């Protein structure tokens, strides 16, 4: 009788284990199906985001700036993206020019002696260097008669030269880039040419916005004093 009882127990355990294994396999199968079905929509979303047109960027940003700064006109302005190391010339909501740039190696910031690029809304206060030749070195905003070697590979120049043209920026937001020790104009924040063109496209400056010399000449000729410039970390 005891043997029969043990036999029944053993048989019952075997059936229970077999049922449990089949149930687990069924669950795994169901999970695999759910994972397979869930993956395709993610791929579609990523493809849509990558194809966003430049014109849409200009249109959305223009609308945003017009609402944030209702007393300013944004028919023509510059948008500087620190994240992408690019400058966009936007006219009537459309991106018409894109330039590679170099902002501060130390990142975003407004404080005096921080060697950082200030964020927020600025305007072009002064344009300097109209007759300076390509590569001409500007000391204290005056052409010193010397030409810098334009370096197109990743080598440092023998000095932190400002070359060719200067667009001197003035902050428009008190406490962010204007007044006391956060004043962009008093910090001498420029858009300017650089002999270190090999570093354009990555953060490398001491606070200013560097451009290739041919690009800064072109920009100088199409931008007026008073043009808004919006600098954003993104």
Image (cartoon, rainbow, N blue to C red):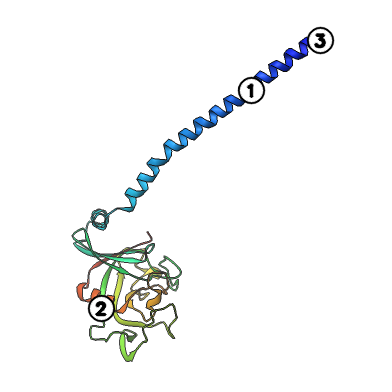
| Residue farthest along the top direction in this orientation | 1
Residue receiving disc 3: 2
**Residue drawn at 43 percent across, 66 percent down:** 107
**Mark 3 vs mark 2, CA separation in Å:** 102 Å
Q: Give the mark nearest the N terminus, 3 or 2.
A: 3
* Label 1 CA crowd tier, 10 Å (few <14, some 14–19, many 20+): few
Label disc, if present, on residue 191 of the rendered structure: none
SS for callout 1: helix
**Residue drawn at 46 percent across, 69 percent down:** 106
How many labels were placed on the picture? 3
- In this rendered view, identify the residue nearer to me: 74 or 57: 57
Residue receiving disc 2: 217
**Mark 2 vs mark 1, CA separation in Å:** 80 Å
On-image quarter of the C terminus: bottom left
Q: Is residue 22 left or right of residue 197?
A: right
Q: Is residue 195 left or right of residue 33?
A: left
Residue 51 locus on image (x, y percent): 30, 53
Residue 17 locus on image (x, y percent): 66, 23
**Mark 1 vs mark 3, CA separation in Å:** 24 Å
SS for callout 3: helix
In which quarter of the view is residue 216 placed? bottom left
Against 212, residue 64 (above or below) is above
Marks 2 and 3: in contact by CB < 8 Å? Answer: no
Q: Give the mark nearest the N terminus, 2 or 1.
A: 1
On-image quarter of the N terminus: top right
**Residue drawn at 35 percent across, 68 percent down:** 179
SS for callout 2: helix
Residue receiving disc 1: 18
In which quarter of the view is residue 96 placed? bottom left
Residue 84 locus on image (x, y percent): 37, 63
């Amino acid at each position: 009788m005891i043997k029969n009882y043990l036999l029944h127990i053993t048989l019952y355990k075997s059936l229970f284990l077999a049922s449990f294994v089949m149930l687990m396999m069924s669950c795994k199968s169901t999970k695999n199906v759910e994972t397979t079905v869930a993956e395709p929509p993610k791929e579609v979303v990523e493809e849509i985001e990558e194809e966003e047109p430049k014109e849409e960027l200009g249109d959305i940003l223009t609308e945003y700036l017009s609402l944030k700064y209702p007393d300013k006109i944004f028919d023509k302005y510059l948008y500087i993206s620190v994240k992408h190391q690019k400058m966009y010339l936007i006219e009537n909501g459309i991106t018409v020019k894109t330039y590679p740039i170099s902002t501060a190696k130390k990142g975003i910031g407004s404080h005096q002696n921080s060697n950082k690029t200030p964020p927020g809304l600025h305007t072009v206060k002064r344009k300097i260097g109209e007759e300076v030749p390509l590569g001409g070195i500007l000391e204290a905003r005056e052409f010193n008669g010397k030409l810098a070697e334009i370096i197109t590979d990743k080598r440092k120049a023998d000095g932190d030269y400002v070359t060719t043209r200067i667009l001197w920026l003035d902050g428009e937001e008190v406490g962010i880039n204007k007044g006391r020790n956060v004043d962009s104009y008093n910090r001498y924040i420029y858009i300017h040419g650089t002999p270190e063109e090999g570093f354009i496209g990555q953060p490398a400056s001491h606070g200013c916005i560097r451009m290739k010399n041919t690009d800064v000449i072109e920009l100088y000729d199409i931008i007026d004093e008073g043009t808004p410039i919006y600098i954003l970390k993104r």
